[in-house]
Structure formats: C-alpha cells, structure tokens
Image (tube, rainbow, N blue to C red):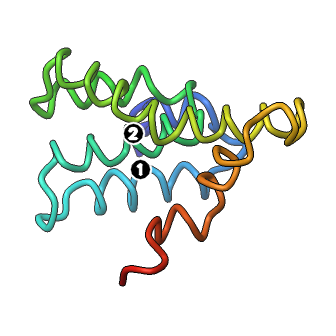
Amino acid sequence: MPEPEQTRTRQQLGDFAPKMVSLTEDVLFGDIWERAELSPRDRSLTTLAALVATGSADQLPGHLARARANGLSDTELKELITHLAFYAGWPRDVRIRRRKAGPQRLSRQAGRMLEPQRLLNPNPGRQ
C-alpha cells in the first residue's frame, strides 16, 4: 500500500494524533469544505473571521493562501482584517484595559455602553 500524501496536517501531527489527522483531512477538508451550501469563497471569509477573532495566527498563512485560491483579493482580505479589528480586537482591548486600569480610569458612560445587555439592546426603552 502506498504511503499517504504528506499533507501539512500529517506533517504536523503525524503518528502523534492519527485520528486528528483523519478528521481534519477527511471530515473538515474532505467534507465540510466541499459542501455546496456555502461557496469556497464564503467558507474562506468565515474561516478567516474565526481565526482572526480567536487570535489563531499560526493557521492564518495557509488559510490566506486558500482564500486567494478561492477568489478573494488582497484588497478584500485587508478589508476583512480591518473590519474585524473593530469587532474582535477593540472590544477585547477595552475589556483588558478596564481590568488593568480599573473602572475609575474609564468614564462611567463608556463602561455602561460596553455592558452586554446594552450591546444587545442599546435602546432599552425602544423595542
């Protein structure tokens, strides 16, 4: 029987986690990425958004290359990352700063604006 192709997943995990290799190659890339319900372009956008939002920088180069192969331009990729900075980076940054500086360093109004219930319903009197 011929040796299996040395994919990046197989190189990284190899014999250490063969089931993870199988799930990644067969289920994730062999099934999920091939489903017709989302285009490969949309899957790349979604995947990159998740990776950027979770700070998974190690996986970005491979998925950026895949996104380009799936039709996204460098301009679109830069715009995606810029857009995500406001939703993934800044809220986390503000939360960290609030913890480090204490609430007295931020205005009460700014702190209230960042409360989860206000983010979900910014105008509580208006439904």
Residue topped by disc 1: 25
Decide: is 25 above or below 101. below
Residue 118 quadrant: bottom right
Q: Residues within 10 Å of mark 2 (few under 14, many from 20)?
A: few
Screen quadrant of the C terminus: bottom left
> Picture coordinates of residue 80 (x, y %)?
29, 30
Instruction: In the rendered structure, find residue 71 and report the number of the disc placed on it.
Output: none
Q: How crowded is mark 1: few (under 14 residues within 10 Å), some or many (20 or more)?
A: some
Left or right: 13, with 78 as reference point: right
Decide: is 101 above or below 27. above
Which three-letter amino acid code belongs to the residue tagged 1? Glu
The answer to which of 68 and 76 lies nearer the viewer is 76
The answer to which of 54 and 15 lies nearer the viewer is 54
How many marks can you see? 2
Which three-letter amino acid code belongs to the residue tagged 2? Pro
Residue under the point 80% across and 38% down? 98
How far is disc 2 from disc 1 in space, using C-alphas?
17 Å
Residue topped by disc 2: 2
Left or right: 15, with 29 as reference point: right
> Picture coordinates of residue 45 (x, y %)?
27, 41
Q: Could you say whether the residue bearing mark 1 is in a helix, strand or loop?
A: helix
> Of marks 2 and 1, which one's residue comes earlier in the chain?
2
Residue at the far top in the pictured view: 74
Residue 56 quadrant: top right
Residue under the point 67% across and 55% down? 112
Residue at the far bottom in the pictured view: 127
Residue under the point 25% across and 24% down? 79
Residue under the point 16% across and 60% down? 38
> Picture coordinates of residue 116 (x, y %)?
62, 64
> Picture coordinates of residue 51 (x, y %)?
48, 39
Q: Could you say whether the residue bearing mark 2 is in a helix, strand or loop?
A: loop
